[in-house]
Image (cartoon, rainbow, N blue to C red):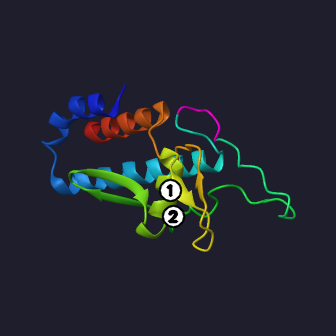
Amino acid sequence: MTIARLESELSGLLHKVAPAARRALARDIGRALRQSQQKRIAAQQNPDGSSFAPRRPQYRQQKGRIRRQMFAKLRTAKWLKVEANAGGVEVGFLRQVERIARVHQYGLRDRISPHIARDVEYPARELLGLADEDVDVINDKVITFLAL
């Protein structure tokens, strides 16, 4: 089930609810979505369940290897924010890290460092997206909310 279909099915019922209650529901859904996105990023998985593309190999001049997991800080609540209002909910990154997330989300070209003139093409790693389980969670939360 796509999010558009889910929205069309439930929008009529939700418009009858007071805006403050819709905002509370959106905040609850947003928290659940952020939590599932954080778990998925920690597991290094795309929304479809496939794993992220691995890091590119290091050059010979560089000693050692990178031991930290990709996007370890990016998935924290400091950078991954929820904005909820009566009209809906958004889960996204703050402006400071938005560029990094966009490059990885869509597999764009970017500079490794401002001091290095060479651009690198990054493979697409979908940081944000709705998995089937997320749609089920949204559906369950809305139905539970409407049943109260």
Quarter residue 51 falls in: top right
Prevailing secondary structure of the magenta residues: loop
Q: As drawn, is 102 to the left or to the right of 59? A: left
Quarter residue 72 falls in: bottom right
Q: As drawn, is 119 to the left or to the right of 66? A: left
Q: Residue at x 65, y 41 (%)?
A: 53
Query: Which residue corresponds to mark 1?
Result: 101
- The image quadrant where one finds the N terminus is top left
Mark 2 or mark 1: whose residue is earlier in sequence: 2
Q: Residue at x 85, y 58 (%)?
A: 60
Label 2, label 1: how many angstroms apart (C-alpha)? 14 Å
Query: Which residue corresponds to mark 2?
Result: 77
Dot 2 amino acid type: Ala
Residue that sits furthest to the front in the current view: 117
> Does the magenta segment cover residue 142?
no
- Find the magenta span and give its range: 48-52
